[in-house]
């Protein structure tokens, strides 16, 4: 397998539990990519794609606002435009219910699966039960007929709409500027996403998975239907190859003729390491689109979508944009001590990953492209990959995740 992010780790665990001999190759240690610095939200209720009807109206305003949630490097526009058009098409009303169902199938068992994976590891505390608070400064912006709320209602998500006072009863640190919230119950948060990945990688290693530190420079099929991998200074051969290399997966696959519209959607976080406040829940400022959560080592504010190409250097001013926004949300927050981070979401235009086989490429399996929900969807992805490789029928419909949907 290529990739020891949270998706690769969960695939490795599910495969080793089925008796496979698993090698995971990563140029870095386990969970050091996007899986390290995310916002930690693990929600069984994930069903709202990034592209929804009417989003195109908001994009120009977001793009020109230096504090806005989206940034696009102008020189990258020609490469980005085809993906952006697919993104807008994916947000048409007629596509949304099927997309929401595809997201839901991977998200629904997330909390239970993580708890089962962590059981008896001594790291059970890396997941905390919580609610998701979607908060609004202007109560008139919270429209009960909003497509996002409707999608959740239709899928029986346990939620309620509350006013500002009730919101502060739930999470006292939130500013009185916020007048309303959409509260989603019965979810969880990773209190250190990187540590969660590392704890699961340790468990996988204990069960027999071998983690190899190397770049994978190329993959190619050989005459025996095996796969050859060019590593740092050596080659390796495997009977079955899983690509779980996050945002880098498309580059590896292009060389064997598998082309998918995967975008490197860069996000940032700012850790407040001496925050002076503590939060019980995952809090999303809906209008400014960033998420705030307490972690073991402080309060993490995460968000932004930057499109600049996979190899562009980080622009940490994008992380520091989050400081005044988070202070506005949490007036008691001490913003003196911060740490910044950038990571790359592997994003498809329709917010669904690619999971499964590739037509015409025997023994090649895809497990990447989870965009904004990779932490949530990783455990179920692992189960599905292990079922497919074992020739067992997964208990969910796989058609939403086929790479061929883009052709
Ligand atoms: C700011 C931010 C906030 C987020 N918040 C949340 C959230 O709250 N909840 C949620 O569910 N999701 C969230 N996400 C999304 C989530 O983090 C990702 O979807 C998920 O981490 C993707 O996991 P992955 O294993 O596919 O990729 P990664 O974690 O990026 O792992 C890919 C791995 O592949 C390795 N690799 C790649 N190419 C090669 C190669 N050629 N050779 C060797 N190794 C290679 C990399 O080194 C890396 O370790 C967030 C993302 C960001 C950026």
Image (cartoon, rainbow, N blue to C red):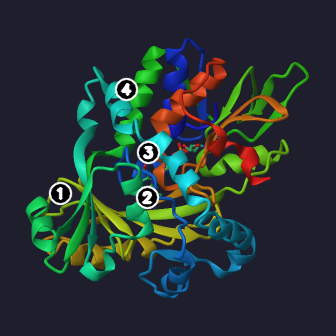
Nearer the observer, 95 or 358: 95
For disc 3, the marked residue is 375
- Is residue 27 visible in the rendered structure shown here? yes
Alpha carbons under labels 3 and 4: distance apart: 14 Å
Q: Is the CB of mark 1 within 8 Å of ligand 1?
A: no
For numbered disc 1, what is the local secondary structure?
A: loop
Few, some or many C-alpha atoms within 10 Å of disc 4 (few <14, some 14-19, many ≥20)?
many
Q: Is the CB of mark 3 within 8 Å of ligand 1?
A: yes
Position of residue 47 relative to residue 28, above or below, is below
For disc 1, the marked residue is 279
* Marked residue nearer the N-terminal end (1 or 2): 2
Q: Residue 8's mark?
A: none
For disc 4, the marked residue is 117
Nearer the observer, 44 or 233: 44
Position of residue 221 relative to residue 320, above or below, is above
Q: Position of residue 389 (x, y in %)?
A: 65, 22
Q: Residue at x 37, y 26 (%)?
A: 117
* Marked residue nearer the N-terminal end (1 or 4): 4
Q: Position of residue 267 (x, y in %)?
A: 48, 63
Position of residue 390 relative to residue 373, above or below, is above
């Amino acid at each position: 397998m290529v990739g020891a992010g949270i998706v690769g780790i969960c695939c490795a665990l599910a495969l080793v539990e089925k008796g496979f001999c698993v090698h995971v190759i990563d140029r870095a240690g386990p969970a050091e990519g996007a899986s390290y610095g995310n916002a930690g939200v693990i929600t069984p209720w994930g069903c709202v794609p990034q592209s929804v009807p009417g989003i195109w109206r908001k994009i120009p305003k977001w793009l020109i606002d230096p504090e806005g949630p989206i940034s696009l490097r102008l020189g990258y526009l020609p490469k980005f435009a085809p993906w952006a058009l697919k993104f807008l098409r994916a947000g048409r009303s007629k596509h949304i219910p099927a997309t929401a169902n595809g997201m839901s199938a991977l998200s629904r068992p997330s909390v239970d699966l993580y708890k089962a994976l962590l059981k008896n590891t001594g790291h059970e505390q890396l997941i905390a039960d919580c609610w998701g608070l979607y908060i609004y400064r202007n109560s008139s912006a919270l429209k009960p007929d909003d497509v996002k709320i409707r999608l959740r209602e239709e899928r029986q998500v346990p939620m309620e709409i509350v006013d500002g006072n009730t919101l502060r009863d739930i999470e006292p640190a939130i500013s009185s500027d916020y007048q309303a919230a959409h509260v989603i119950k019965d979810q969880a948060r990773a209190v250190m996403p990187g540590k969660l990945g590392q704890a699961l990688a340790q468990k996988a290693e204990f069960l027999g998975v071998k983690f190899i530190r190397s770049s994978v420079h190329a993959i190619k099929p050989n005459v025996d239907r095996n796969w050859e991998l060019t590593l740092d200074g050596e080659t390796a051969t495997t009977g079955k190859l899983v690509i779980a290399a996050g945002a880098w997966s498309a580059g590896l696959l292009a060389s064997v003729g598998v082309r998918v519209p995967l975008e490197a959607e860069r996000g940032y976080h700012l850790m407040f390491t001496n925050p002076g406040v503590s939060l019980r829940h995952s809090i999303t400022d809906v209008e400014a689109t960033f998420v705030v959560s307490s972690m073991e080592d402080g309060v993490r504010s995460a968000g932004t979508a930057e499109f600049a190409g996979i190899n562009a250097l980080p622009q940490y001013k994008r992380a520091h944009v989050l400081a005044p926004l988070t202070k506005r949300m949490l007036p008691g927050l001490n913003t003196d001590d911060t740490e910044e981070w950038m990571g790359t979401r592997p994003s498809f235009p329709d917010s669904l990953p690619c999971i499964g086989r590739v037509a015409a490429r025997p023994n090649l399996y895809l497990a990447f492209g989870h965009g904004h929900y990779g932490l949530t969807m990783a455990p179920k992805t692992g189960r599905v990959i292990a079922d497919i490789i074992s020739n067992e029928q997964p208990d969910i419909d796989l058609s939403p995740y086929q790479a061929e949907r883009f052709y």
